[in-house]
Amino acid sequence: MSTFKAPKGTYDLIPPDSAKYLAVREAIAAPLRNSGYGYIETPGFESVELFARGVGESTDIVTKEMYAFETKGGDKLALRPEGTASVLRAALEANLHKAGNLPVKLWYSGSYYRYERPQKGRYRHFSQVGAEAIGAEDPALDAELIILADQAYRSLGLRNFRILLNSLGDKECRPVYRAALQDFLRGLDLDEDTLRRAQINPLRVLDDKRADVQKQLTEAPLLRDYLCDACKAYHEEVRELITAAGVSFEDDPKLVRGLDYYTRTTFEFVHDGLGSQSAVGGGGRYDGLSEMIGGPALPSVGWALGVDRTVLALEAEGVELELPATTSVFAVPLGEEARRFLFGKVTELRKVGIAADFSYGGKGLKGAMKNANRSGARYTIVAGERDLAEGVVQLKDMESGEQTAVGVNEIVAELEARLG
């Protein structure tokens, strides 16, 4: 047994469970690829300053949870705690916004890292699929992304999730609400750290999960009561477009996202079967983020969905994904001549798209057939010297137990026909 273990708060994805994660990633990505989103991949680490500016210096992510380090050359880097800032940085660096086709629509998949107390559904290393539409201010884009996420979850068979929706206003109306909220918070019995957070970004206090804080926030002023006419109209159009698409949602006037860059539309996907860690994904509009990190004005919107949380939600609902067979055909050679012949046939089967495996290591018939059973293959090809002398192999249906002789030159076509 190895003396090394996965670091605390992390996990290994191993077969057969890893197939679920791949299926979830594919299901979330499929509607994005079908809607004009191109794939982007960014480095696993970035400048600390990128996240400090973009995510927000007052956020727990930056102050407490980021894995930051200094390189031998003196660069201050951090493992990426989220995807949006990295994707926007990459789009700006590559001048994608200057290609004349806005919005720039991108999707990504990868691992992210936050130092926090590990618990079920909350890890220090986690996987997300995300999407960003960069460079256009249009309620239809906000609605599109919410609809695509809903489509992805439903394609997986998830039903018991809810979409929470709110508006955070913009630079015109949010300052007025911010001042009113700060006045309210000053009158509460809050600890020094929370009061300090209230001075920097009071909306983040609304996102505090502690029961004693939430109890004091019941009479807090609501942002919807301070929205300007433009933000009200924008939000109402988002709501109308989502409703017209047949997607259900709940208005949540207290919903705020934990990152500083969000404006106007904000939303969260929650699943009540996950306990306290109920969020499976979320996102919103972030019209000022590009300017925060040194770029031009590029109104944008996006989301990130947790692959880990989605798998847990599927398990909570008892949804069994239809996963493709890892092996459809298993070849069992008896003797050296059969070994060479069947290895060639396995290669042929793979070339025509049939998942095939081989009994390696020179096992006898009994041991090889045990491996065939464990592989989950629908068919097993067995051949020995006598079979090859007669120009046949034995094809066994592992479900019915029926075994038939098939010509050596017909086996690939026969399996293609049987497996469809």
Image (cartoon, helix red, strand yellow):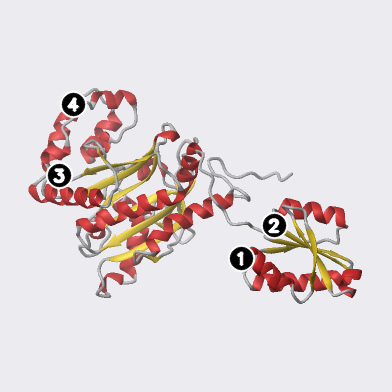
Estimate the spatial distance between the alpha carbons at disc 4 and disc 1, rounded to whole Å: 63 Å
Residue on which the image places disc 1: 420
Amino acid type, callout 4: Glu
How many neighbours does mark 2 have within 10 angstroms: few (below 14), some (14-19), or many (20 or more)? Answer: some
User: Mark 4 and mark 3 in contact (Cβ < 8 Å)?
Assistant: no
Estimate the spatial distance between the alpha carbons at disc 2 and disc 3, rounded to whole Å: 61 Å
How many neighbours does mark 3 have within 10 angstroms: few (below 14), some (14-19), or many (20 or more)? Answer: many
Residue drawn at the location 65% of the way across and 69% of the way down: 416
Q: Which sits earlier in the primary sequence, circle 4 or circle 2?
A: 4
**Residue 374 appearing in the image:** yes
User: Mark 2 and mark 4 in contact (Cβ < 8 Å)?
Assistant: no
Residue on which the image places disc 3: 174
Amino acid type, callout 3: Arg
Secondary structure state at the residue bearing disc 2: loop
Q: Is residue 247 above or below residue 251?
A: below
Residue on which the image places disc 4: 219
Estimate the spatial distance between the alpha carbons at disc 3 and disc 4, rounded to whole Å: 18 Å
How many neighbours does mark 1 have within 10 angstroms: few (below 14), some (14-19), or many (20 or more)? Answer: few
Residue 268: where, in percent of width, then height?
Answer: 32, 43
Estimate the spatial distance between the alpha carbons at disc 3 and disc 1, rounded to whole Å: 59 Å
Camera-side mark, 2 or 3: 2
Q: Is residue 335 above or below residue 183?
A: below
Q: Which sits earlier in the primary sequence, circle 3 or circle 1?
A: 3
Tell which of 266 and 144 is nearer to you: 144
Camera-side mark, 1 or 2: 1
**Residue 81 appearing in the image:** no
